[in-house]
Image (cartoon, rainbow, N blue to C red):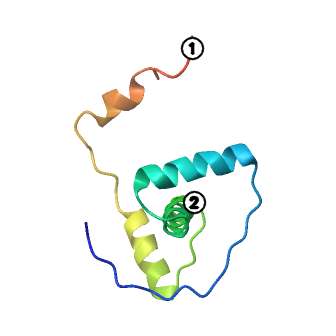
């Protein structure tokens, strides 16, 4: 496991929960072999990164926007097999 530099934790997060949720969390903390703070912070930061990775709006400076536009103006490539894959019926749609 990669060793991470110890950071000073100075900010506080408080949450309200049900006794059932707390018991579940406590069991998961025990199973993971860590403490509650580490467990919560690790899982909250993973969730936060997933949310932010799925953003649909990005801000670019002028240089970034120029590069983005250049990439999007390129002619499409013909990728072997892609057309047949796209034309295949979806397995997730009931017909």
Name the disc covering residue 51, or none.
2
Indicate left or right for 63 with 94 as reference: left
Is residue 87 positioned above or below 80 on the image? above
Q: Going 73% across and 47% down the picture, which residue do you hit?
A: 19
The number of numbered badges drawn on the structure is 2
Q: Position of residue 9 (x, y in %)?
A: 55, 85
Q: Position of residue 57 (x, y in %)?
A: 60, 66
Q: Going 75% across and 54% down the picture, which residue do you hit?
A: 17
Is residue 33 positioned above or below 58 on the image? above
Name the disc covering residue 94, or none.
1
Task: Check disc 2: other Cα within 10 Å, few if <14, some if 14-19, many if 20+.
Answer: few
* Residue ranking furthest to the top: 95
Q: Position of residue 56 (x, y in %)?
A: 59, 61
Indicate left or right for 95 with 32 as reference: right
Task: Check disc 1: other Cα within 10 Å, few if <14, some if 14-19, many if 20+.
Answer: few
* Residue ranking furthest to the left: 80
Earlier in the chain: of badge 1 and badge 2, it is 2
Q: 66 or 95, which lies in front?
A: 95
């Amino acid at each position: 496991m990669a060793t991470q530099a110890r950071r000073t934790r100075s900010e506080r997060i408080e949450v309200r929960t049900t006794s059932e949720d707390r018991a579940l969390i406590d069991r998961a903390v025990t199973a993971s072999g860590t403490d509650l703070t580490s467990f919560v912070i690790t899982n909250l930061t993973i969730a936060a990164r997933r949310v932010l990775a799925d953003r649909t709006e990005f801000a670019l400076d002028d240089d970034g926007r120029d590069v983005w536009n250049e990439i999007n103006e390129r002619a499409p490539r013909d990728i072997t097999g892609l057309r047949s894959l796209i034309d295949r019926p979806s397995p997730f749609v009931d017909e």
